Amino acid sequence: MSDVSFSAEDIAHFLQENPEFFQEHAELFANLRVPHPHETRAISLGERQIMTLRTRTKDLEWKLAGLMHNASNNEKISASLYSWCRRMLSEPDATALPAHMIRSLSDLFDLPTIALRLWGLPGLGESEFLQDVTDGIKAYAQALAKPYCGPLQAQEAATWLGQPPASLAIVALRPEPGQAPFGLLVLGSDDAQRFTPDMSTDFLETINDLASASLLRLKASVHTESAGND
């Protein structure tokens, strides 16, 4: 008679494929003892299953708490964006929008430094928001398909903030996705975890959409004035 050996994997596979085994051997299921996961004593298989379910329940509770925390934060950000959009829409003077925009963003999102630079908007005249825009800045904006979030990496646009931020977000302002940008919005924070590479950029992209739509009034206002002079 030849010896037959079974590996742990063989036994586990057998039990998975034959769930009726413990029903047919109920006394084995009731009397089976397994090691306690954190102590030296042995416990029943049923008690071990209860401990496993409790652990899974705690894990799910932690995940649910995290989801609720994120949902609460997202709700606050959505409310702030709504308030900011309302301020932009209620501003009657289009030339006041750039200054009003960075001031309201700083207040709403509690950011110490924000910078905005624009180009190709003749309605601004000789505004300070047209200064320090180099070819390198425009090339960077053109290549920035999505908002940048993360640490300072010697970005030229970060010099507009006045002091080096611990983390920053940079948004290229575009009329529509894929179109040429006409500005850069730079948000600086002294918190290294405020803007991180793994964070979602949905809200920053919403800021891009709202800011771009508002600032394009500076181009439309020139066309309106020209038509009125004619």
Image (cartoon, rainbow, N blue to C red):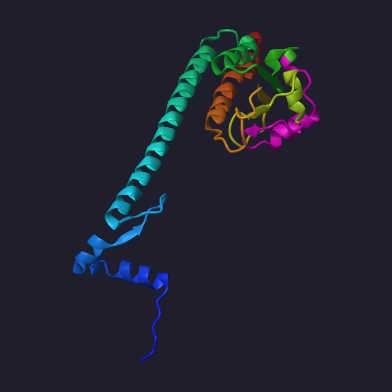
**Residue 70 location, x and y as percent?**
46, 31
Q: Residue furthest bottom?
A: 1
Outermost residue on the front side: it is 41
Provide the residue span drawn in magenta.
Answer: 129-154
Identity of the residue drawn at 42% across and 49% down: 38
Nearer to me, 38 or 229: 38
Image quarter in which the C terminus is found? top right
Q: Position of residue 9 (x, y in %)?
A: 41, 70
Task: Examine the image and state in which quarter residue 54 appears.
Answer: top left
Taking 40 as reference, is 173 above or below it?
Answer: above
Residues 6 and 121: in front is 6
Q: Nearer the viewer, residue 218 or 155?
A: 155
Identity of the residue drawn at 53% across and 32% down: 202
* Quadrant of the rendering where the N terminus is positioned: bottom left
Residue 5 at what x, y percent from top left? 40, 80
Magenta residue check for 210: no
Identify whether 49 is placed above or below 61. below
Left or right of 77 on screen, residue 119: right
**Image location (x, y in percent) of residue 198:** 58, 38
Query: Quick one: 138 or 46, which is closer to the camera?
Result: 46
Q: What residue is drawn where x is 60% and y is 17%?
A: 217
- 226 left or right, relative to 66: right
Say left or right for 91 vs 119: left
In the rendered image, the vertical position of residue 172 relative to residue 22, given as above or below: above
Q: Quadrant of residue 195?
A: top right
Identify which residue is drawn at 44% across, 29% down.
69
Q: Is residue 141 magenta?
A: yes
